[in-house]
Image (cartoon, coloured by chain):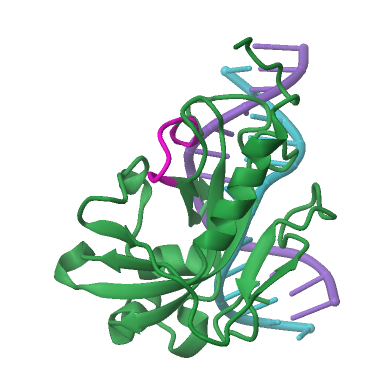
Chain colours: A green, B cyan, C purple
Amino acid sequence: MTQKQAGNFPTFLEQAVEDAAQLLLGCMLKCDIDTATVRVRIVETEAYDQADEASHTFRGQTLRNATMFGPPGHLYVYFTYGMHYCSNIVAGPVGYGAGVLIRAVEPVDGADILEQRRGVAGVNATNGPAKLTQALGINRAMDGHDLRNQPLQLITSSLNPGESIATSPRIGIAKARTVHRRYYIAGNDYVSR
DNA sequence: GACAAGATTTGCT
DNA sequence: GCAAATCTTGTCG
């Protein structure tokens, strides 16, 4: 197997990330940070990989995005705009920088704790990538965390009966806006605008 | 060593 | 609807 050149990756790797972004919809995150147990359901995701001009991994591995080049199923947390953290789930093989950004979640257990951490109630507590990260108590110390272990675990689950996946252009990013790699549960109240 | 831009959120006009 | 807040990372000289 020869080494692939940057920007010339097998299409099945790109497809795999998009599949992962859709499979993660409906999955649960169980969180035991700060002595409180909280469970949320993923309702909106977005796929990123090395083929994306907008991805942190587009220009290769750096100190910041090293987690995304590591084993899948780990958490990639990055800091941006001087005040916000965002959470990704690594979704590519080791050496291929790919992941799925969690854009919105729906509280299942402990909604009051989430709202307390955020200082706001209702859908505004978790309907955005930086919002849900703050609500779950995730910080940069969680970067590289294995989602099979405490205190933050990913629990596989499927969509509820009657629910369906919708797709749209990505949000909040200048580059590659025409690429449809944002997925969400149609009609869910917690999907970001 | 300096500079520009960023996978956002919030508040004010 | 628009601009500010705020600081880390990556790139360039």
- Work out which quarter of the rendered image holds the C terminus of chain A and state it: bottom right
User: Of A163 and A112, which appears nearest the observer?
Assistant: A163
Whether residue A61 is visible? yes
Vertical arrangement, residue A189 with respect to residue A175, above or below: below
User: Which residues lie in the magenta part?
Assistant: A67-76
Q: Viewed as shown, does residue A174 lie left or right of A151?
A: right
Residue at the far left: name it: A35
User: Of A170 and A82, which appears nearest the observer?
Assistant: A170
Whether the magenta-drawn stretch holds residue A116 is answered as no
Corner quadrant of residue A165: bottom right
- Residue A121: x, y in percent? 43, 89
Vertical arrangement, residue A104 with respect to residue A178, above or below: below
- Residue A171: x, y in percent? 72, 62
- Work out which quarter of the rendered image holds the N terminus of chain A and state it: top right
Corner quadrant of residue A166: bottom right
User: Of A115 and A183, which appears nearest the observer?
Assistant: A183
- Residue A180: x, y in percent? 77, 58
Total residue callouts? 0
